[in-house]
Image (spheres, rainbow, N blue to C red):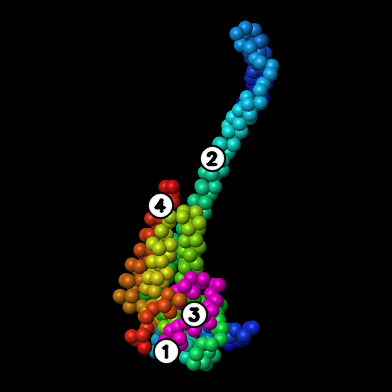
């Protein structure tokens, strides 16, 4: 993780060049592992500062990785704070950003 | 045509011109005014402009449309190739005896990324040139929200692709291919 002009940058490529599936039990590079070991320690208990997650420089993403990461973010943080402070970068696959926000917008309250 | 024949034809045309000129000069009923008023002059030049400009505009319009269609068709073919390639790769991964490796996942995910970007570009092109196109919903939406998920949701390193997942993903990718082919046909017949 690096900081640029007070924006914390979390690069998925620092975590894995081949991100995996949904849960730790699914194998290496899961979204759960990324969230718990990279995002949560960098962000803390609430998102009060600008955060940038950089999805570039990997081989690509399974939809389960994106949807689980969005779900974890939605469950762990205030949704309005996330919308205000979280920025996503995906020049390699621009549609991934929309996919993330679509998943993020789902109602996870019953599964929390 | 031999050069001597060409010279003969030009000479004959020149002679014909002289004869017609002499006849026209002798026709007593046709009188040309030496003076031309402004409105006649404007009409004449407007007519001349219409004769040259309208066909030029029509030609340019059709040439541009044809060129755009050719680009779109070519991009559709590129996307179809990518999807066929993914279908083949997914089948290969399904049929392999060993569990999926990191390299298998790299190959599948990078192919999917290329296909996603290809379809997204195509969708943007169709939005710009065919404003009422529903490609973004019919194809891009279907691929991005369903096919991508069917191909990757249960495809993991260290595991096999099971029969059910293979059937679902194959059907899904076939539907995307068919949808693009439908748009290809519509664009081609336009």
What whole-number distance in Å separates the C-alpha atoms at marks 1 and 4?
A: 45 Å
Q: Position of residue A73 (x, y in %)?
A: 45, 85
Q: Chain of mark 3?
A: A
Of callouts 3 and 1, which one flags the residue occurring earlier in the amino acid sequence? 1
Q: Chain of mark 2?
A: B
Nearest-to-viewer mark from 2 and 1: 2
Disc on res. A83: 3
Q: Position of residue B146 (x, y in %)?
A: 38, 70
**Along the viewing direction, whichever of B76 and A105 lies nearer the viewer:** A105
As helix, strand or loop, the secondary structure at mark 3 comes to helix
| Residue positioned 61% across, 11% down in the render | B30
Of callouts 4 and 2, which one flags the residue occurring earlier in the amino acid sequence? 2
Q: Which residues are magenta?
A: A74-100
Pointer 1 residue: A24
| Residue positioned 39% across, 78% down in the render | A106
Disc on res. B185: 4
Pointer 2 residue: B58
**Classed neighbour count for the residue bearing mark 3: other residues with Cα under 10 Å, few (<14), some (14–19), many (≥20):** some
As helix, strand or loop, the secondary structure at mark 4 comes to helix
What whole-number distance in Å separates the C-alpha atoms at marks 4 and 2?
A: 24 Å
* Residue B22, quarter of the rendered image: top right
What whole-number distance in Å separates the C-alpha atoms at marks 3 and 2?
A: 50 Å
Nearest-to-viewer mark from 4 and 2: 2
Residue A13 in view here: no
């Amino acid at each position: 993780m690096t900081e640029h002009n007070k924006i914390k940058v979390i690069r998925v490529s620092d975590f894995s060049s081949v991100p995996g599936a949904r849960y730790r039990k699914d194998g290496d590079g899961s979204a759960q592992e990324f969230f718990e070991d990279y995002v949560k320690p960098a962000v803390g208990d609430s998102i009060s500062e600008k955060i940038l997650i950089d999805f570039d420089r990997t081989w690509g993403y399974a939809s389960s990785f994106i949807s689980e990461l969005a779900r974890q973010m939605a469950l762990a943080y205030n949704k309005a704070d996330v919308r205000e402070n979280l920025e996503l970068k995906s020049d390699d696959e621009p549609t991934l950003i929309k996919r993330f926000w679509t998943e993020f917008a789902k109602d996870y309250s019953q599964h929390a | 045509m031999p050069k001597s024949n060409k010279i003969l034809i030009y000479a004959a045309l020149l002679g014909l011109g002289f004869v017609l000129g002499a006849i026209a000069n002798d026709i007593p009923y046709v009188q040309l005014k030496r003076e031309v008023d402004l409105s006649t002059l404007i009409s004449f030049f407007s007519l001349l402009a219409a004769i040259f400009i309208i066909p030029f505009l029509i030609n340019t319009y059709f040439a541009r449309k044809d060129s755009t269609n050719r680009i779109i068709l070519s991009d559709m073919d590129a996307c179809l190739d990518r999807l066929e390639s993914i279908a083949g790769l997914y089948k290969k991964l399904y049929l392999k005896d060993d569990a999926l490796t990191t390299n298998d996942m790299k190959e599948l995910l990078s192919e999917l990324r290329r296909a996603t970007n290809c379809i997204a570009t195509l969708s943007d092109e169709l939005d710009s040139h065919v404003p009422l196109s529903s490609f973004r919903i019919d194809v891009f939406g279907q691929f991005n929200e369903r096919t991508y998920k069917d191909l990757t949701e249960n495809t993991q390193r260290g595991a096999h692709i099971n029969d059910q997942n293979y059937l679902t993903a194959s059907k899904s990718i076939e539907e995307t291919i068919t949808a693009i082919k439908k748009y290809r046909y519509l664009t081609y017949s336009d």
